[in-house]
Amino acid sequence: MGWLTFGYFISYIPYAMLVKALASGVTPLSSQQVSGAEMLPATVLGQLVAMVFFLALTGRWRHLRRARIGGHRIPVAGRETLAAGFFTSLIVGATTMNYTFSGVSILFMLLLMRGGVLILSPLIDAARKRRVMKNSWVGLFLSLIAVSVALSDVHSYQLTLAAVLSVLIYLVGYLGRFDIMSRVAKNGVVATDRRFFAEEHAAAPIWLAVLLGAGALAGQPQLRAGFTTFLGTPPALAAAAIGVTYEVLFVFATLIYLDRREYTWGVPAWAFASLMSGLVASYALTWLAGLLAPGTGQLIALGFGVAAVAALAYPSAALWWRTRGTGAACRVLFVCGGNTSRSPMAEVIAWAQAAEAGVAHAFRFSSAGIATPLSARPMAPGARSALAELGLQRVPGRGNPRRHRARPITSELCRVSSVIYCMTRAHRDRVVALAPEAASRTVRLDPHGDIPDPDGQSPEAYRQCAQHIQRSVHLRLCQLTEVYGPLPSTGRG
Protein backbone atom coordinates (compact mmCIF):
# COMPACT_ATOMS: atom_id res chain seq x y z
CA MET A 1 0.00 0.00 0.00
CA GLY A 2 2.89 2.36 0.76
CA TRP A 3 4.36 2.02 -2.71
CA LEU A 4 0.95 2.42 -4.35
CA THR A 5 0.29 5.61 -2.39
CA PHE A 6 3.73 6.97 -3.27
CA GLY A 7 3.18 6.14 -6.95
CA TYR A 8 -0.17 7.92 -6.87
CA PHE A 9 1.45 10.96 -5.23
CA ILE A 10 4.21 11.17 -7.85
CA SER A 11 1.88 10.68 -10.83
CA TYR A 12 -0.71 13.19 -9.59
CA ILE A 13 1.78 16.09 -9.58
CA PRO A 14 2.22 16.39 -13.39
CA TYR A 15 -1.51 15.80 -13.90
CA ALA A 16 -2.48 18.67 -11.58
CA MET A 17 0.18 20.95 -13.03
CA LEU A 18 -0.87 20.31 -16.63
CA VAL A 19 -4.58 20.88 -15.96
CA LYS A 20 -3.96 24.10 -14.03
CA ALA A 21 -1.44 25.42 -16.54
CA LEU A 22 -3.64 24.69 -19.56
CA ALA A 23 -6.76 26.14 -17.92
CA SER A 24 -4.80 29.26 -16.87
CA GLY A 25 -3.11 29.76 -20.25
CA VAL A 26 0.46 29.51 -18.93
CA THR A 27 1.74 26.58 -21.00
CA PRO A 28 4.72 27.06 -23.35
CA LEU A 29 2.46 25.86 -26.17
CA SER A 30 -0.10 28.66 -25.85
CA SER A 31 -1.14 31.59 -23.66
CA GLN A 32 -4.80 30.98 -24.44
CA GLN A 33 -6.98 29.72 -21.58
CA VAL A 34 -8.71 26.42 -22.39
CA SER A 35 -12.04 25.41 -20.85
CA GLY A 36 -12.54 21.98 -19.35
CA ALA A 37 -15.13 20.90 -21.92
CA GLU A 38 -12.84 21.94 -24.76
CA MET A 39 -9.80 20.04 -23.45
CA LEU A 40 -11.68 16.85 -22.43
CA PRO A 41 -11.92 15.24 -25.91
CA ALA A 42 -8.14 15.41 -26.41
CA THR A 43 -7.64 14.30 -22.81
CA VAL A 44 -9.76 11.18 -23.21
CA LEU A 45 -8.04 10.34 -26.50
CA GLY A 46 -4.69 10.52 -24.73
CA GLN A 47 -5.97 8.26 -21.96
CA LEU A 48 -7.41 5.78 -24.48
CA VAL A 49 -4.06 5.41 -26.23
CA ALA A 50 -2.21 5.09 -22.90
CA MET A 51 -4.75 2.53 -21.65
CA VAL A 52 -4.28 0.29 -24.70
CA PHE A 53 -0.49 0.45 -24.35
CA PHE A 54 -0.66 -0.30 -20.62
CA LEU A 55 -2.95 -3.32 -20.97
CA ALA A 56 -0.87 -4.65 -23.85
CA LEU A 57 2.58 -4.10 -22.34
CA THR A 58 1.66 -5.49 -18.91
CA GLY A 59 -0.33 -8.43 -20.33
CA ARG A 60 -3.39 -7.44 -18.29
CA TRP A 61 -5.57 -7.61 -21.41
CA ARG A 62 -5.48 -11.41 -20.89
CA HIS A 63 -7.72 -10.98 -17.85
CA LEU A 64 -10.56 -9.60 -19.99
CA ARG A 65 -13.48 -11.91 -20.73
CA ARG A 66 -13.91 -13.21 -24.24
CA ALA A 67 -17.05 -13.38 -26.37
CA ARG A 68 -17.33 -15.13 -29.73
CA ILE A 69 -18.51 -12.64 -32.35
CA GLY A 70 -18.49 -13.57 -36.03
CA GLY A 71 -16.20 -16.51 -35.45
CA HIS A 72 -13.67 -14.43 -33.47
CA ARG A 73 -13.07 -14.27 -29.72
CA ILE A 74 -13.33 -10.58 -28.81
CA PRO A 75 -12.29 -9.08 -25.43
CA VAL A 76 -15.38 -7.83 -23.59
CA ALA A 77 -16.38 -6.62 -20.13
CA GLY A 78 -19.05 -8.10 -17.90
CA ARG A 79 -22.30 -6.32 -17.13
CA GLU A 80 -21.23 -5.16 -13.66
CA THR A 81 -17.76 -4.04 -14.73
CA LEU A 82 -19.35 -2.14 -17.62
CA ALA A 83 -21.51 -0.35 -15.05
CA ALA A 84 -18.43 0.30 -12.90
CA GLY A 85 -16.66 1.67 -15.97
CA PHE A 86 -19.58 4.06 -16.56
CA PHE A 87 -19.38 5.42 -13.01
CA THR A 88 -15.60 5.66 -13.30
CA SER A 89 -15.94 7.66 -16.52
CA LEU A 90 -17.99 10.20 -14.55
CA ILE A 91 -15.12 10.47 -12.07
CA VAL A 92 -12.51 10.88 -14.81
CA GLY A 93 -14.43 13.58 -16.65
CA ALA A 94 -15.57 15.47 -13.55
CA THR A 95 -12.09 15.49 -11.99
CA THR A 96 -10.59 17.36 -14.93
CA MET A 97 -13.62 19.64 -15.24
CA ASN A 98 -13.52 20.54 -11.55
CA TYR A 99 -10.00 21.91 -11.87
CA THR A 100 -10.87 24.24 -14.73
CA PHE A 101 -13.84 26.29 -13.47
CA SER A 102 -13.16 30.00 -13.23
CA GLY A 103 -13.63 31.66 -9.87
CA VAL A 104 -12.52 28.64 -7.83
CA SER A 105 -9.03 27.41 -7.08
CA ILE A 106 -7.91 23.97 -8.10
CA LEU A 107 -6.94 23.33 -4.48
CA PHE A 108 -10.43 24.17 -3.27
CA MET A 109 -12.04 21.75 -5.72
CA LEU A 110 -9.48 19.08 -4.83
CA LEU A 111 -10.35 19.37 -1.15
CA LEU A 112 -14.09 19.44 -1.86
CA MET A 113 -13.89 16.23 -3.87
CA ARG A 114 -11.64 14.38 -1.43
CA GLY A 115 -13.74 15.45 1.54
CA GLY A 116 -16.85 14.02 -0.10
CA VAL A 117 -15.19 10.67 -0.77
CA LEU A 118 -13.84 10.56 2.81
CA ILE A 119 -17.41 10.87 4.06
CA LEU A 120 -18.67 8.21 1.65
CA SER A 121 -16.04 5.60 2.54
CA PRO A 122 -17.31 4.52 6.00
CA LEU A 123 -20.91 4.60 4.78
CA ILE A 124 -20.07 2.13 2.00
CA ASP A 125 -18.05 -0.03 4.40
CA ALA A 126 -20.99 -0.13 6.80
CA ALA A 127 -23.45 -0.93 4.01
CA ARG A 128 -21.21 -3.81 2.85
CA LYS A 129 -20.72 -4.99 6.47
CA ARG A 130 -16.95 -4.53 6.29
CA ARG A 131 -15.29 -4.32 9.68
CA VAL A 132 -13.80 -0.86 10.24
CA MET A 133 -10.88 -0.98 12.68
CA LYS A 134 -10.44 1.70 15.32
CA ASN A 135 -7.25 3.06 13.81
CA SER A 136 -9.05 3.47 10.46
CA TRP A 137 -11.74 5.59 12.13
CA VAL A 138 -9.00 7.69 13.75
CA GLY A 139 -7.26 8.09 10.38
CA LEU A 140 -10.55 9.06 8.73
CA PHE A 141 -11.33 11.59 11.47
CA LEU A 142 -7.90 13.21 11.21
CA SER A 143 -8.18 13.31 7.42
CA LEU A 144 -11.51 15.15 7.67
CA ILE A 145 -9.92 17.65 10.06
CA ALA A 146 -7.11 18.14 7.54
CA VAL A 147 -9.63 18.86 4.79
CA SER A 148 -11.63 21.23 7.03
CA VAL A 149 -8.52 23.20 8.03
CA ALA A 150 -7.42 23.46 4.41
CA LEU A 151 -10.87 24.63 3.31
CA SER A 152 -10.82 27.39 5.90
CA ASP A 153 -7.79 28.86 4.15
CA VAL A 154 -9.39 29.05 0.71
CA HIS A 155 -10.88 32.49 0.16
CA SER A 156 -12.56 34.54 -2.56
CA TYR A 157 -13.96 31.65 -4.56
CA GLN A 158 -17.19 31.63 -6.55
CA LEU A 159 -18.87 28.24 -6.54
CA THR A 160 -21.09 28.28 -9.63
CA LEU A 161 -24.01 25.95 -10.27
CA ALA A 162 -21.98 24.15 -12.94
CA ALA A 163 -19.16 23.54 -10.44
CA VAL A 164 -21.60 22.21 -7.84
CA LEU A 165 -23.18 19.85 -10.36
CA SER A 166 -19.75 18.64 -11.46
CA VAL A 167 -18.76 17.82 -7.88
CA LEU A 168 -22.04 15.99 -7.36
CA ILE A 169 -21.44 13.96 -10.53
CA TYR A 170 -17.96 13.13 -9.23
CA LEU A 171 -19.37 11.87 -5.90
CA VAL A 172 -22.14 9.89 -7.61
CA GLY A 173 -19.42 8.26 -9.69
CA TYR A 174 -17.50 7.18 -6.58
CA LEU A 175 -20.65 5.98 -4.84
CA GLY A 176 -21.57 3.75 -7.78
CA ARG A 177 -18.01 2.59 -8.42
CA PHE A 178 -17.27 1.65 -4.80
CA ASP A 179 -20.60 -0.14 -4.41
CA ILE A 180 -20.01 -2.32 -7.48
CA MET A 181 -16.35 -2.91 -6.59
CA SER A 182 -17.40 -4.09 -3.12
CA ARG A 183 -19.87 -6.59 -4.58
CA VAL A 184 -17.82 -8.14 -7.38
CA ALA A 185 -14.18 -7.63 -6.34
CA LYS A 186 -12.11 -6.37 -3.39
CA ASN A 187 -12.33 -9.78 -1.73
CA GLY A 188 -8.73 -10.95 -1.94
CA VAL A 189 -9.40 -13.35 -4.83
CA VAL A 190 -6.57 -12.38 -7.16
CA ALA A 191 -8.20 -13.62 -10.36
CA THR A 192 -11.42 -11.69 -9.62
CA ASP A 193 -9.58 -8.47 -8.77
CA ARG A 194 -7.43 -8.72 -11.90
CA ARG A 195 -10.46 -9.22 -14.13
CA PHE A 196 -12.30 -6.30 -12.53
CA PHE A 197 -9.22 -4.07 -12.86
CA ALA A 198 -8.71 -4.89 -16.55
CA GLU A 199 -12.38 -4.66 -17.57
CA GLU A 200 -13.14 -1.45 -15.67
CA HIS A 201 -9.86 0.00 -16.90
CA ALA A 202 -10.78 -0.65 -20.52
CA ALA A 203 -14.42 0.43 -20.18
CA ALA A 204 -13.98 3.79 -18.40
CA PRO A 205 -12.26 5.88 -21.14
CA ILE A 206 -14.49 4.31 -23.81
CA TRP A 207 -17.57 5.33 -21.83
CA LEU A 208 -16.19 8.85 -21.40
CA ALA A 209 -15.46 9.17 -25.12
CA VAL A 210 -19.03 8.06 -25.89
CA LEU A 211 -20.53 10.53 -23.40
CA LEU A 212 -18.41 13.41 -24.70
CA GLY A 213 -19.22 12.48 -28.30
CA ALA A 214 -22.93 12.42 -27.48
CA GLY A 215 -22.62 15.88 -25.94
CA ALA A 216 -20.84 17.18 -29.03
CA LEU A 217 -23.49 15.72 -31.35
CA ALA A 218 -26.19 17.25 -29.15
CA GLY A 219 -24.72 20.66 -29.92
CA GLN A 220 -22.54 21.54 -26.90
CA PRO A 221 -20.24 24.09 -28.57
CA GLN A 222 -17.11 23.61 -26.46
CA LEU A 223 -17.24 19.81 -26.77
CA ARG A 224 -17.80 20.15 -30.51
CA ALA A 225 -14.78 22.46 -30.76
CA GLY A 226 -12.78 20.00 -28.65
CA PHE A 227 -13.42 17.22 -31.20
CA THR A 228 -12.74 19.45 -34.23
CA THR A 229 -10.78 22.70 -34.31
CA PHE A 230 -9.02 22.27 -30.95
CA LEU A 231 -7.44 18.92 -31.91
CA GLY A 232 -5.34 20.67 -34.54
CA THR A 233 -3.85 23.23 -32.15
CA PRO A 234 -0.64 22.99 -30.03
CA PRO A 235 -2.54 23.03 -26.68
CA ALA A 236 -4.20 19.76 -27.74
CA LEU A 237 -0.84 18.06 -27.11
CA ALA A 238 -0.91 19.27 -23.51
CA ALA A 239 -4.50 18.07 -23.17
CA ALA A 240 -3.52 14.64 -24.51
CA ALA A 241 -0.63 14.57 -22.01
CA ILE A 242 -3.19 15.18 -19.25
CA GLY A 243 -4.93 11.99 -20.35
CA VAL A 244 -1.65 10.05 -20.28
CA THR A 245 -0.81 11.26 -16.76
CA TYR A 246 -4.33 10.46 -15.60
CA GLU A 247 -3.92 6.93 -16.93
CA VAL A 248 -0.86 6.46 -14.72
CA LEU A 249 -2.48 7.78 -11.54
CA PHE A 250 -5.65 5.83 -12.39
CA VAL A 251 -3.67 2.59 -12.18
CA PHE A 252 -2.29 3.39 -8.72
CA ALA A 253 -5.64 4.64 -7.37
CA THR A 254 -7.56 1.56 -8.55
CA LEU A 255 -5.04 -0.80 -6.97
CA ILE A 256 -5.38 1.13 -3.70
CA TYR A 257 -9.16 0.76 -3.76
CA LEU A 258 -8.99 -2.96 -4.63
CA ASP A 259 -7.02 -3.72 -1.47
CA ARG A 260 -9.23 -6.14 0.48
CA ARG A 261 -9.15 -3.92 3.54
CA GLU A 262 -11.97 -1.45 4.19
CA TYR A 263 -12.33 1.77 2.20
CA THR A 264 -11.96 3.68 5.45
CA TRP A 265 -8.39 2.35 5.54
CA GLY A 266 -7.34 3.15 1.97
CA VAL A 267 -9.24 6.34 1.18
CA PRO A 268 -7.51 8.57 3.79
CA ALA A 269 -4.10 7.52 2.44
CA TRP A 270 -5.29 8.25 -1.11
CA ALA A 271 -6.74 11.61 -0.06
CA PHE A 272 -3.56 12.58 1.77
CA ALA A 273 -1.44 11.72 -1.29
CA SER A 274 -3.75 13.88 -3.42
CA LEU A 275 -3.46 16.84 -1.06
CA MET A 276 0.32 16.55 -0.98
CA SER A 277 0.43 16.36 -4.78
CA GLY A 278 -1.79 19.41 -5.08
CA LEU A 279 0.46 21.40 -2.79
CA VAL A 280 3.62 20.35 -4.61
CA ALA A 281 2.04 21.19 -7.97
CA SER A 282 0.82 24.57 -6.66
CA TYR A 283 4.25 25.57 -5.37
CA ALA A 284 5.86 24.39 -8.60
CA LEU A 285 3.49 26.54 -10.67
CA THR A 286 4.09 29.46 -8.31
CA TRP A 287 7.80 29.18 -8.98
CA LEU A 288 7.51 28.47 -12.71
CA ALA A 289 4.55 30.64 -13.73
CA GLY A 290 3.94 33.07 -10.88
CA LEU A 291 0.57 31.62 -9.86
CA LEU A 292 -0.74 32.23 -6.34
CA ALA A 293 0.88 30.00 -3.69
CA PRO A 294 -1.18 28.00 -1.15
CA GLY A 295 -1.86 29.63 2.20
CA THR A 296 -0.60 28.58 5.60
CA GLY A 297 -3.84 26.72 6.32
CA GLN A 298 -2.90 24.05 3.80
CA LEU A 299 0.43 23.55 5.59
CA ILE A 300 -1.37 23.12 8.91
CA ALA A 301 -3.69 20.65 7.20
CA LEU A 302 -0.65 18.64 6.16
CA GLY A 303 0.18 18.11 9.83
CA PHE A 304 -3.23 16.49 10.37
CA GLY A 305 -2.72 14.48 7.20
CA VAL A 306 0.58 13.12 8.47
CA ALA A 307 -1.14 12.24 11.75
CA ALA A 308 -3.83 10.38 9.77
CA VAL A 309 -1.22 8.33 7.94
CA ALA A 310 0.48 7.59 11.27
CA ALA A 311 -2.84 6.34 12.66
CA LEU A 312 -3.29 4.05 9.66
CA ALA A 313 0.23 2.67 9.99
CA TYR A 314 0.14 2.32 13.78
CA PRO A 315 -0.84 -1.39 14.02
CA SER A 316 2.11 -2.51 11.90
CA ALA A 317 4.52 -0.10 13.60
CA ALA A 318 3.36 -1.06 17.10
CA LEU A 319 3.66 -4.76 16.33
CA TRP A 320 7.20 -4.26 14.99
CA TRP A 321 8.15 -2.26 18.08
CA ARG A 322 6.88 -4.96 20.43
CA THR A 323 8.90 -7.67 18.74
CA ARG A 324 12.03 -5.74 17.70
CA GLY A 325 15.28 -7.51 18.44
CA THR A 326 13.69 -10.10 20.74
CA GLY A 327 12.69 -12.78 18.29
CA ALA A 328 9.30 -12.81 20.01
CA ALA A 329 6.33 -13.59 17.82
CA CYS A 330 2.66 -14.35 18.11
CA ARG A 331 2.43 -18.09 17.41
CA VAL A 332 -0.81 -19.01 15.66
CA LEU A 333 -1.82 -22.64 15.23
CA PHE A 334 -4.61 -23.72 12.86
CA VAL A 335 -6.27 -27.06 13.57
CA CYS A 336 -8.58 -29.26 11.51
CA GLY A 337 -9.14 -33.01 11.17
CA GLY A 338 -6.48 -34.45 8.91
CA ASN A 339 -4.30 -31.37 8.30
CA THR A 340 -4.59 -31.78 4.54
CA SER A 341 -7.21 -29.18 3.57
CA ARG A 342 -8.66 -26.58 5.91
CA SER A 343 -5.85 -25.91 8.40
CA PRO A 344 -3.01 -25.84 5.81
CA MET A 345 -5.10 -23.52 3.62
CA ALA A 346 -5.57 -21.25 6.65
CA GLU A 347 -1.82 -21.33 7.30
CA VAL A 348 -0.95 -20.26 3.74
CA ILE A 349 -3.67 -17.59 3.65
CA ALA A 350 -2.54 -16.20 7.02
CA TRP A 351 1.08 -15.87 5.87
CA ALA A 352 -0.09 -14.07 2.70
CA GLN A 353 -2.36 -11.63 4.56
CA ALA A 354 0.26 -10.91 7.22
CA ALA A 355 2.86 -10.23 4.52
CA GLU A 356 0.46 -7.91 2.68
CA ALA A 357 -0.21 -6.01 5.92
CA GLY A 358 3.51 -5.77 6.67
CA VAL A 359 3.28 -7.71 9.95
CA ALA A 360 4.60 -11.14 8.91
CA HIS A 361 7.72 -10.64 11.04
CA ALA A 362 5.55 -10.62 14.17
CA PHE A 363 3.80 -13.95 13.56
CA ARG A 364 4.57 -17.63 13.29
CA PHE A 365 1.77 -19.59 11.60
CA SER A 366 1.54 -23.36 11.61
CA SER A 367 -1.09 -26.08 11.32
CA ALA A 368 -1.83 -29.56 12.60
CA GLY A 369 -4.59 -32.18 12.63
CA ILE A 370 -6.40 -33.94 15.46
CA ALA A 371 -7.14 -37.09 13.44
CA THR A 372 -3.86 -37.71 11.68
CA PRO A 373 -3.02 -41.39 12.01
CA LEU A 374 -0.10 -41.11 9.59
CA SER A 375 2.06 -38.04 9.13
CA ALA A 376 3.58 -36.69 5.93
CA ARG A 377 0.40 -36.70 3.85
CA PRO A 378 0.41 -33.90 1.23
CA MET A 379 -2.14 -31.12 0.89
CA ALA A 380 -5.27 -32.24 -0.92
CA PRO A 381 -5.24 -31.36 -4.66
CA GLY A 382 -8.57 -29.56 -4.28
CA ALA A 383 -7.09 -27.37 -1.54
CA ARG A 384 -4.04 -26.53 -3.67
CA SER A 385 -6.29 -25.62 -6.60
CA ALA A 386 -8.44 -23.39 -4.39
CA LEU A 387 -5.32 -21.59 -3.13
CA ALA A 388 -4.11 -21.17 -6.70
CA GLU A 389 -7.38 -19.40 -7.57
CA LEU A 390 -6.61 -16.99 -4.74
CA GLY A 391 -3.19 -16.38 -6.29
CA LEU A 392 -1.42 -18.31 -3.51
CA GLN A 393 0.43 -21.01 -5.40
CA ARG A 394 3.46 -19.95 -3.37
CA VAL A 395 3.89 -17.55 -0.47
CA PRO A 396 7.29 -15.79 -0.67
CA GLY A 397 9.63 -17.01 2.03
CA ARG A 398 7.06 -19.47 3.40
CA GLY A 399 7.33 -22.44 1.06
CA ASN A 400 5.09 -24.05 -1.48
CA PRO A 401 1.68 -25.61 -0.66
CA ARG A 402 2.85 -28.64 -2.63
CA ARG A 403 5.53 -29.22 0.01
CA HIS A 404 3.07 -29.31 2.91
CA ARG A 405 3.04 -32.51 4.91
CA ALA A 406 0.38 -33.30 7.49
CA ARG A 407 1.29 -33.67 11.14
CA PRO A 408 -0.64 -34.50 14.32
CA ILE A 409 -1.29 -31.97 17.04
CA THR A 410 0.65 -32.43 20.27
CA SER A 411 0.47 -30.98 23.76
CA GLU A 412 3.78 -29.22 23.11
CA LEU A 413 2.36 -27.47 20.02
CA CYS A 414 -0.58 -26.30 22.12
CA ARG A 415 1.71 -25.11 24.92
CA VAL A 416 3.88 -22.88 22.73
CA SER A 417 0.99 -21.43 20.67
CA SER A 418 -0.28 -17.95 21.47
CA VAL A 419 -3.68 -18.75 20.01
CA ILE A 420 -5.22 -21.88 18.48
CA TYR A 421 -7.88 -21.55 15.81
CA CYS A 422 -9.98 -24.64 15.17
CA MET A 423 -12.24 -25.28 12.20
CA THR A 424 -15.13 -26.72 14.23
CA ARG A 425 -16.40 -26.89 17.81
CA ALA A 426 -15.57 -30.60 17.86
CA HIS A 427 -11.97 -29.82 16.98
CA ARG A 428 -11.79 -27.32 19.82
CA ASP A 429 -13.13 -29.89 22.27
CA ARG A 430 -10.42 -32.35 21.20
CA VAL A 431 -7.68 -29.73 21.60
CA VAL A 432 -8.89 -28.74 25.08
CA ALA A 433 -9.03 -32.41 26.08
CA LEU A 434 -5.40 -32.79 24.96
CA ALA A 435 -4.16 -29.52 26.51
CA PRO A 436 -6.59 -28.15 29.15
CA GLU A 437 -4.25 -25.24 29.95
CA ALA A 438 -4.80 -23.94 26.40
CA ALA A 439 -8.59 -23.67 26.75
CA SER A 440 -8.61 -19.88 27.03
CA ARG A 441 -6.47 -19.60 23.89
CA THR A 442 -8.42 -22.10 21.79
CA VAL A 443 -11.38 -20.86 19.71
CA ARG A 444 -13.08 -21.55 16.41
CA LEU A 445 -11.55 -19.72 13.44
CA ASP A 446 -14.98 -18.49 12.41
CA PRO A 447 -16.59 -17.12 15.58
CA HIS A 448 -20.05 -17.57 14.04
CA GLY A 449 -19.89 -21.28 13.25
CA ASP A 450 -18.01 -24.29 11.94
CA ILE A 451 -16.09 -24.36 8.67
CA PRO A 452 -17.32 -27.50 6.80
CA ASP A 453 -14.89 -30.11 5.54
CA PRO A 454 -14.66 -30.12 1.70
CA ASP A 455 -12.86 -33.48 1.59
CA GLY A 456 -14.12 -35.66 -1.27
CA GLN A 457 -16.39 -32.94 -2.65
CA SER A 458 -16.37 -30.84 -5.81
CA PRO A 459 -13.82 -28.11 -6.67
CA GLU A 460 -16.55 -25.58 -5.93
CA ALA A 461 -16.76 -26.87 -2.35
CA TYR A 462 -13.01 -26.35 -1.93
CA ARG A 463 -13.30 -22.89 -3.47
CA GLN A 464 -16.08 -21.88 -1.09
CA CYS A 465 -14.18 -23.33 1.84
CA ALA A 466 -11.03 -21.36 0.92
CA GLN A 467 -13.02 -18.13 0.65
CA HIS A 468 -14.71 -18.86 4.00
CA ILE A 469 -11.29 -19.40 5.59
CA GLN A 470 -9.92 -16.26 3.95
CA ARG A 471 -12.66 -14.10 5.43
CA SER A 472 -12.24 -15.68 8.86
CA VAL A 473 -8.44 -15.36 8.84
CA HIS A 474 -8.75 -11.69 7.88
CA LEU A 475 -11.10 -11.10 10.82
CA ARG A 476 -8.79 -12.88 13.26
CA LEU A 477 -5.67 -11.07 12.06
CA CYS A 478 -7.49 -7.76 12.44
CA GLN A 479 -8.23 -8.72 16.03
CA LEU A 480 -4.63 -9.77 16.70
CA THR A 481 -3.23 -6.52 15.34
CA GLU A 482 -5.95 -4.34 16.88
CA VAL A 483 -4.41 -1.16 18.23
CA TYR A 484 -6.33 -1.11 21.49
CA GLY A 485 -6.07 -4.79 22.29
CA PRO A 486 -2.86 -6.55 23.37
CA LEU A 487 -1.56 -9.54 21.48
CA PRO A 488 -2.15 -12.91 23.14
CA SER A 489 0.51 -14.26 25.43
CA THR A 490 3.30 -16.11 23.66
CA GLY A 491 2.47 -19.11 25.78
CA ARG A 492 6.07 -20.14 26.20
CA GLY A 493 5.54 -21.14 29.84
Image (spheres, grey):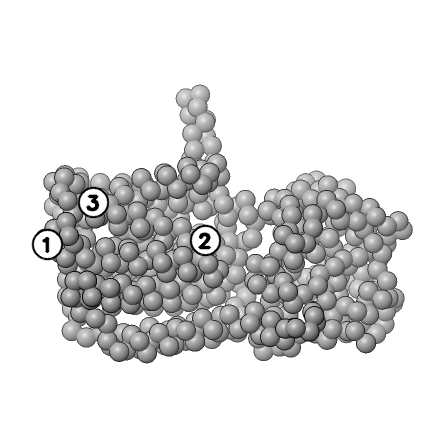
Which secondary structure lies at badge 3? helix
Left or right of 140? Residue 16 is: left
Contact between marks 3 and 2 (CB within 8 A): the answer is no
- Residue at 56% in and 62% down: 357
Does the rendering let one see residue 378?
A: yes
The residue tagged 1 is 31
Of the image marks 1 and 2, the number of the one nearer the N terminus = 1
Which sits in the foreground, 12 or 127? 12
Which sits in the foreground, 489 or 450? 489
Give the quarter of the image for residue 267.
Answer: bottom left
- Residue 26's x, y, as percent? 14, 57
The residue tagged 2 is 255
The mark closer to the camera, 3 or 2, is 3
Q: Amino acid at mark 1?
A: Ser
Q: Amino acid at mark 3?
A: Leu
Image quadrant in which the C terminus is located = bottom right
Which secondary structure lies at badge 2? helix
- Residue at 79% in and 69% down: 416
Of the image marks 1 and 3, the number of the one nearer the N terminus = 1
Does the rendering let one see residue 77?
A: no
Of the image marks 3 and 2, the number of the one nearer the N terminus = 3
- Residue at 49% in and 39% down: 63
Tag shown at residue 72: none
- Residue 243's x, y, as percent? 28, 47
Q: Amino acid at mark 2?
A: Leu
Q: Residue lying farthest right?
A: 373
